[in-house]
Image (cartoon, helix red, strand yellow):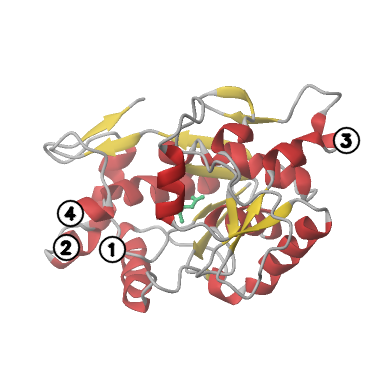
Amino acid sequence: MHTRFAPSPTGRLHLGHALSATRAHDCARTAGGRFSLRIEDIDGTRSRPEHVEAILRDLEWLGLGWDGPVTFQSQRLNLYQQALDRLRNMGLLYPCFCTRADIAASLSAPHGPEGTAYPGICRGLAAPDLTRPHSWRLDVAKALKLPLSFSQGGRGIWWHDIFAGHIRADPLSHGDIILARKDAPASYHLAATVDDAAQGITHIVRGKDLFGATHIHRLLQALLDLPTPEYRHHELLLGPDGQRLAKRHGAPTLEAMRLAGEDGRALADRLREGRLPVGFRSAKA
Ligand code: GLU
C-alpha cells in the first residue's frame, strides 16, 4: 500500500488538512506500506515557499513522518508535458481563449443541468491563433467515443471508493476541463493523475470535496493507460460557523496551534478518535 498527502502551498494548513494527512498516513502505516508527501506547487502565482516550510513543520508536529524525499510538482513539469502531448496527438485537446467573463456571459443562456460546465465555446475553432494566451481543454465527449478497451464492452469506466462503493465515472457532467492553464503548464487534474500513477500510489485518501474530481481523474487514467487506485474520500470538517473549513474563510491554522504550544501528536490522536475541538464537527455528507 502506498498513500500520499498532496497539499497545495497556497496557504497554511488547517484542521481539515490534519485529518486528511492523518488518515492517509495511518492507512499506509497500519498496512506496513509507504506514505509520501507531494507538494502541489504548479500554481506559480499562488504557491509560496513559506507555506511549504510551514506544511513540513506542521506534519512533523502532528507526528506524521513521510517516506522518501518530498516531491514538488514544479520539478516534474516534463511529465505533465508528455501526457499533454500524448492527448494532443490523440486529437483530444483544443486551445481555449475564453476569459471568465466570456464563460459567464455564455452561461446566462440555458446549458443543461450542469450549469457551471464549460459550454464548449472554443471547441472546433477552424484556425486558432496560438500566439494569443490560451489554455488547453479536453474534448470529453470525443474522448468517451474512442473505441478503447477502457470502456469495458460499453459498460463505461468505473472506480471504487471504500465508503461510496462502485462508482461509474461521469466525466461528461464536468464539461471540457482544462488540462493546461493559461498561467500554468498543467492543471491540478492532469498533474495529480500523472503523479499518482508515476509514484505508484495505490490508495488515494482525501476529503470528499475532491470526490467529483475523481470522475475526471478516472477518465484521464483510461486515456493515458494508467492504473486506477483505490479511493477513500473521507468526511469533511465543519467549523463553528457550520461551513467547511477553507483557507480562504480564515479557518484556524495548524501553525497558530503549533506556535501556541499545543501538542500536535495529541491533536492527531484526538482526530483519530473523532474528538474534535469545541465547535467543530464532521459532515458525513
Ligand atoms: N492539492 C489538492 C489540495 O490541496 C489535493 C490533491 C489531492 O489530494 O488529490 O486540495
Q: Residues within 10 Å of mark 2 (few under 14, many from 20)?
A: some
Q: Which mark is residue 252?
A: 4
Contact between labelled residues 4 and 3, with CB atoms less than 8 Å apart: no
Mark 3 or mark 4: which is in front?
A: 3
In the rendered structure, the answer to whether residue 277 lies left or right of residue 197 reads left
Residue 51 image position (x, y, % from top left): 33, 71
Mark 2, residue position: 256
Q: Secondary structure at mark 3?
A: loop
Q: Is residue 52 left or right of residue 75?
A: left
- Measure how far apart labels 1 and 2 are at the Cα level: 9 Å
Q: Is residue 247 above or below residue 236?
A: below
* Image marks 2 and 4: residues in contact by CB distance under 8 Å: yes
- Report which residue position mark 1 lands on: 12
Query: Which one is in front in this view, the residue at disc 1 or the one at disc 3?
Result: 3
Q: Is residue 197 above or below residue 31?
A: below
Distance between mark 1 and mark 4 Cα atoms = 9 Å
Q: x and y percent of residue 111 in the render?
A: 50, 31
Residue 132 appears at what percent x and percent y?
Answer: 58, 72
Mark 1–mark 2 contact, CB under 8 Å? yes
Give me the C-alpha separation between circle 1 and circle 3. 44 Å
Which amino acid type is marked by label 2?
Ala
Decide which of tag 1 and tag 4 comes sooner along the chain: 1
Residue kind at label 1, given as amino acid type: Arg
